Amino acid sequence: MALLAPSKPSTSDHGRRRARPSRRGDGRAAALYLAPAAILLLGVLAYPIYQLVLISVYDYGQAEAAGAAPLVFIGLHNYTDLLANSAFWTVLAKTIGFAAVCVIGSLVLGTVLAMLASRVRPWARTVLFLAALGAWATPAVAGSYIWLFLFDADFGLVNKVLSGIGFTAMEQHSWTYDTYGTFGLVALEVIWCSFPFVLVTMYAGIKAIPEEVLEAASLDGASTPRTATAIVLPMLRPVLMIATVQSIIWDFKVFTQIYVMTNGGGLAGRNLVLNVYAYQQAFAGSQYGLGAAIGVVMTLILMSITGLYVRSQKREAGLV
Amino acid sequence: MSTLVRTRKRRHHGRTVAEIVTVVIAAVIAFPLYWMVLTALKPAGEIQSASPAPWTLAPTFDSFRRVLTVSGFGGYFLNSVLVAVVVVALSLLLSFLSAVALTRFRFRGRTVLLVMLLVAQMVPVEALTIPLFFLMRSIGGAVPAFGLNQLGSLVLVHLAFSLPFAIWMLRGFVAAVPVELEEAATVDGASRFRFVWQILFPLVAPGLVATSVLAFIHAWNDFLFAKTFIISQTENQTLPQAMLVFFKPEENDWGAIMASSTLMTIPVLIFFVLVQRKLVSGMAGAVKG
């Protein structure tokens, strides 16, 4: 889920200062206001997390899921199985590589465009934002089909244009023939629909930089690239952090694009990422315990990344 | 003086270049969407032509007709709309209530709740498909409308997933309303209930809009949970999964695929364009804290 607003945790300090002196019955009223959301979050978010861990320590297959066989506690057996399986390590390595390409791609594109957007007049900015919002708004399934079609071997525009300008070898080139070509195509789609978030966030961050700072820089004779690298980027660090962590979280658990564009993980699973791998193990292979273990591993990886981020935020603000 | 004029002129020149670059990039970004709509409107012969034209002189709704007549595509569309609208409405209501409680009321454990809210946003919900599948199965035993194969199961999960972020975001908007306003309202004899609904609620409307976009998109785009939960009652499928079932790239009916993609994208596009300004300012507000 999105984690864009962890802003400066100073807001909670802010709130504390702002909140009026406590009133009798505040506690009860608060409980009443919070109850619906709390019940839902406990039931549909917290409880499943507990269940995920629980399922991962059982031998949980088709018979157990159907209630036809008793559950057998097997401790960390699913985990040791997983770690001893070379397929898991391959999938993990591919997931990290794929996510890294997507994260770097969308961060660079989004940040560069945000800087560009802050330097042009509003009409040009609106044009850029509308295009970006269009890409952002495109549902993952639709986006996957669009990019598949653009790069289709027989009817895709890309091959037609390439062979039209002289690269005749590209006429029926299959972009999804090998593992990395396929990953590249999926990454293109993911970057296309995820850089707009970076763009909007970074643009908001740039707008938050006081005008005076930039004026002072320009009066001191700093060039545009120098202002960008020496002043704007350092000041954008907190916002860039938010965008980075958010992108890592998103791109590490891409499911739809991989599933749709590679037809469920590619030939012999060569385009599997962790998320799809867990899904296949559980729902196609009826190895719910193993699937849950993969889910736990994925959660731990992502939690440690975001944990580092929260710690850094905490240190910065000395709070939360 | 002359250097100043020169700098200004150079800067003006630089801006024009930057604007041209911006427009070209925007065109590249928007191109896939243009190509989607164009393909959806092209007659079949033009789609498979050896030299595809970037326009069509004979636009036709044939592909759309094919999509809409295929096994109740309209029904899947309505399912998607229903899930997304209910999720947005409930998530706004619940997150507004929680945001008010977390910013306006003093009580013990508030900071703990805030931290938990942050942590909840980091849970990779996709990892929870397995336990959620079993949870929905058991819920279905008690309340069939929220069980497997029912749209209610999708509403439940998307509502829960959208809440942590929605509450967090709205909190900033609620906190931005000056406390003095509440004091004034109290002095004027307004009850807290009245203050919350008649004064606070309209004031945080921009925040509600920004929050609703994300909840809508999550629910509308969801493929994984729809695929996991709606297994046998295919009439309850939502668009993303229905598309995958009915249109396969191997069959090469790109006209129909692009037409259904267009139908799926348009509601989100409309939503986005309508709230575009508020979304950007809402995000800016959230980032600034």
Image: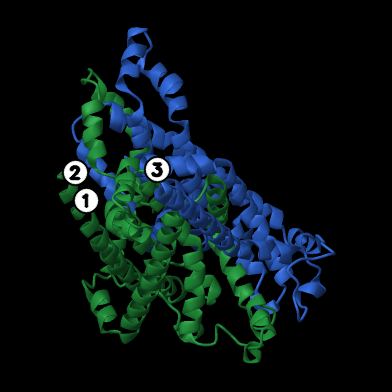
Q: Disc 3 marks which residue?
A: B284
Mark 2 vs 1: CB contact within 8 A: yes
Colour scheme of the rendered structure:
by chain
For the residues labelled 2 and 1, the Cα–Cα distance comes to: 9 Å
Is tag 2's residue or tag 1's residue first in the polypeptide sequence?
1
Q: Nearer the viewer, mark 2 or mark 1?
A: 1
**Which numbered marker is on residue A158?**
none
**Residue B74 makes an appearance in the image:** yes
Query: Could you tell me which chain the residue with mark 1 belongs to?
Result: A
What amino acid is labelled 1 in the image? Gln
Quarter of the image with the N terminus of chain B is: top left
What amino acid is labelled 2 in the image? Val
Q: Nearer the viewer, mark 3 or mark 1?
A: 3
In the rendered picture, chain B carries what hue?
blue
How far across and down, in percent of the image, does residue A256 sit?
50, 66
Is A303 left or right of A141, judged from the image as shown?
left
Q: Report the residue at 54% width, 76% height from top.
A: A263
Mark 3 vs 1: CB contact within 8 A: no
What amino acid is labelled 3 in the image? Ala
Q: Which chain did the renderer colour green?
A: A
On whether disc 3 and disc 2 are found on a single subunit, the reply is: no
Q: Nearer the viewer, mark 3 or mark 2?
A: 3
Element on which disc 1 rests: helix
Query: Could you tell me which chain the residue with mark 3 belongs to?
Result: B
Is B194 left or right of A146, judged from the image as shown?
left
Q: Disc 2 marks which residue?
A: A320
For the residues labelled 3 and 1, the Cα–Cα distance comes to: 18 Å
How far across and down, in percent of the image, does residue B103 sit?
29, 31
